[in-house]
Image (tube, grey):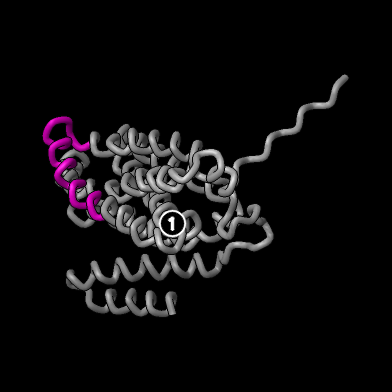
Amino acid sequence: MSDALPTPAAPSLPTLRERYGDRYRWYLLLSVMVGVMASIMSSTIVNVAIPDMSHHFALGQERAQWVSSGFMVAMTVSMLTTPWLLARYGYRRTYVGTMVMLLAGGIAGGLANNFSLVLAARVVEGLAAGVVQPIPAIIILRAFEPHEQGRASGVFGMGVVLAPAIGPSIGGILVDLFGWRSIFFMVVPFCLASIWLAWKFVPTTAPGGVVASRSNGLDWRGLALGTIGTLCLLNGLVELRGDAPLQAALLLAGALASLA
């Protein structure tokens, strides 16, 4: 009985550069740019659908605003995990994983039949968006020569600025034509395209060009404190607009204590 054939090594950044030539770095930038634009659009496009969702689920304004706030809290917290995820799992697995999460959140939100599921879907989307957004800056530093990094950052920045600018306009058209559920499904084609591009062009190596390392653990205590602080800060700012100044002060004090 013959021995099994060895599994081919996953492509690294130098291997992909050799395979695709000088144009590879722009293919790589396009791959991550599509996904980041999808994540940014998902954060802004939902705002135009809040009135329709409020009516559909019979929500008050404060509860409805958690559709946006839940996304932002999740995004802020998960952004802290990006270096650890990249070091542990490498570029490709981390990036594709976040795109799968964003895709799942979009589909789940569009199919949700109660507000709790909508909010859970938004939190999943926020977790994915927070992890994916720092990745392009790291990739630009790794894939582009110093004299090209300014141009690459400019091209990427154009997409980052364009996404939140056109998101609400597209969202308004979708809500008028198809209802609030359509804004969740809008990220689906972007995520599918980004996943396909990532499997072709995003390398597997971790930042620094080394094999993914499992030795360094995540600072769970710091992550928990960051989560608590962000939630206290957000709720404290909301309470400042209400008639509970003491509660707002306590929440803001808790935020300062957690984030200090």
Residue nearest the viewer, comparing 52 with 40: 40
Camera-nearest residue between 154 and 148: 148
Location of the C terminus by quadrant is: bottom left
Residue 225 located within the stretch drawn in magenta: no
Residue 98 can be seen in this image: no
Where 61 falls versus 113 (above or below)?
A: below
Q: Is residue 68 above or below residue 183?
A: below
Q: Nearer the viewer, residue 217 or 3?
A: 3
SS under mark 1: helix
Q: Residue at x 52, y 61 (%)?
A: 83
Q: Position of residue 173 (x, y in %)?
A: 13, 37
| Count of numbered labels shown in the rendering | 1
On the rendered structure, is 52 left or right of 154?
A: left
Identify the main secondary structure in magenta. helix
The quarter of the image holding the N terminus is top right
Q: Quadrant of residue 178?
A: top left
Judged from this view, the residue extending furthest toward the right is: 1
Q: Quick one: label 1, few (<14), some, or many (20+) residues within 10 Å?
A: many
Query: Does residue 90 show up?
Result: yes
Residue at 45% in and 48% down = 25
In the picture shown, does residue 221 fall above or below 113?
below
Tell me the magenta residue range: 161-180
What residue lies at 57% left-to-right and 50% top-to-bottom? 90
Q: Residue furthest top?
A: 1
**Residue type at mark 1?**
Ile
Label 1, on which residue? Answer: 140
Q: Provide residue 145's location: percent of width, then percent of height.
A: 46, 59
Residue 58 in picture, x, y percent from top left: 18, 43
- What x and y, as percent, mark residue 136? 42, 54
Q: Which residue corresponds to the image point at 38% horizontal and 74% vertical from the top-left? A: 255
In magenta segment, residue 166 = yes
